[in-house]
Image: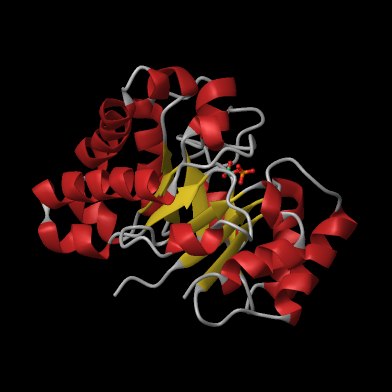
């Protein structure tokens, strides 16, 4: 049985004060029936972990593909681990879109995260154009396949996958539960072709306009193992309501 995970990706939102309040709000009603993690902006990670690290899991929104060196603005997987993060996102669509991260680079980031004992959350998903052209399966399988090729299937004993259709992120449009299930099942069968046992244990999250009102139906799908939540993770009450939707 795969334990569900609800992860809050705060993106570039908030202040130190609002970050502290959000964590306090989550911890006040801590959901114990599922795994919970938050991904605050980099500057707030270390102080939040120092104060709350034992009570809540934290993740970084990205890490470098390099170990160390002259890479201004980058943060290494070792640094992210060093401050106490458990998770790191890799290949979020906003990184792919605005920072031109390609499949191979994302795969290298997943590799670095694994090397440094982090749990990578590999984001895959098709753009609106690709969706409308009926290319969803091809795109997500290519994105996942590149990481399987680079890291090996055994890595998916640890790697978490997040299916996030780009047209659903921050738009208020959500993949229907049936459509999400279809893509999740497709991804799991791709993993199963390489290793059946690992595929049945890999967690595949759904992300893209998950809200308190639609979370339960999405999470009830057999291959949806939780959610990666953007906008609705910025209010403790909404995030907790989404956690409560995990049955
Ligand atoms: P959203 O973002 O919930 O605001 O659509 C999801 C994400 O980008 O991870």
The residue under the point 63% across, 39% down is 172
Locate residue 74, reporting x and y percent. Answer: 61, 34
Q: Is residue 87 left or right of residue 153?
A: right
Q: Is residue 38 left or right of residue 91?
A: right
Residue 61 vertical placement versus 202 (above, below): above
Locate residue 53, reporting x and y percent. Answer: 65, 72
Of the pair 12 and 213, the residue shown nearer to us: 213
Locate residue 79, reporting x and y percent. Answer: 58, 51
The residue under the point 40% across, 28% down is 105
Q: Is residue 24 left or right of residue 5?
A: right
Locate residue 32, reporting x and y percent. Answer: 55, 82
Q: How is the image coloured?
A: secondary structure
Whether residue 40 is visible here, answered yes or no, is no
Q: Is residue 87 left or right of residue 49?
A: left
Of the pair 41 and 162, the residue shown nearer to us: 162
Q: Quadrant of the N terminus?
A: bottom left
Q: Quadrant of ligand 1?
A: top right
Residue 137: which quarter of the image?
top left
The residue under the point 23% across, 51% down is 188
Of the pair 21 and 70, the residue shown nearer to us: 21
Residue 31 vertical placement versus 163 (above, below): below
The residue under the point 82% across, 48% down is 14
Whether residue 170 is visible here, answered yes or no, is yes
Residue 214 vertical placement versus 96 (above, below): below
């Amino acid at each position: 049985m795969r334990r569900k995970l609800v992860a809050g990706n705060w993106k570039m939102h908030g202040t130190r004060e609002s970050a502290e309040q959000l964590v306090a709000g989550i911890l006040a009603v801590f959901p114990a029936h599922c795994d919970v993690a938050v991904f605050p902006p980099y500057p707030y990670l270390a102080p939040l972990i120092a104060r709350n690290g034992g009570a809540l899991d934290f993740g970084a929104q990205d890490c470098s593909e390099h170990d160390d060196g002259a890479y201004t603005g980058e943060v290494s997987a070792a640094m992210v681990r060093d401050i106490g993060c458990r998770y790191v996102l890799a290949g979020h669509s906003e990184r792919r879109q605005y920072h031109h991260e390609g499949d191979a680079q994302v795969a290298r980031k997943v590799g670095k995260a694994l090397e440094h004992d982090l749990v990578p959350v590999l984001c895959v998903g098709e753009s609106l154009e690709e969706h409308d052209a009926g290319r969803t399966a091809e795109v997500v399988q290519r994105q996942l396949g590149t990481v399987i090729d680079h890291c090996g299937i055994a890595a998916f004993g640890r790697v978490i996958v997040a299916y996030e259709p780009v047209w659903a992120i921050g738009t208020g449009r959500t993949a229907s539960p049936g459509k999400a299930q279809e893509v999740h099942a497709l991804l799991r069968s791709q993993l199963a072709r390489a290793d059946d046992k690992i595929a049945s244990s890999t967690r595949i999250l759904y992300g893209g306009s998950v809200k308190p009102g639609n979370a339960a139906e999405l999470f009830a799908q057999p291959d949806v193992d939780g959610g990666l939540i953007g906008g609705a993770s910025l209010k403790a009450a909404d995030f907790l309501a989404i956690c409560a939707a995990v049955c």
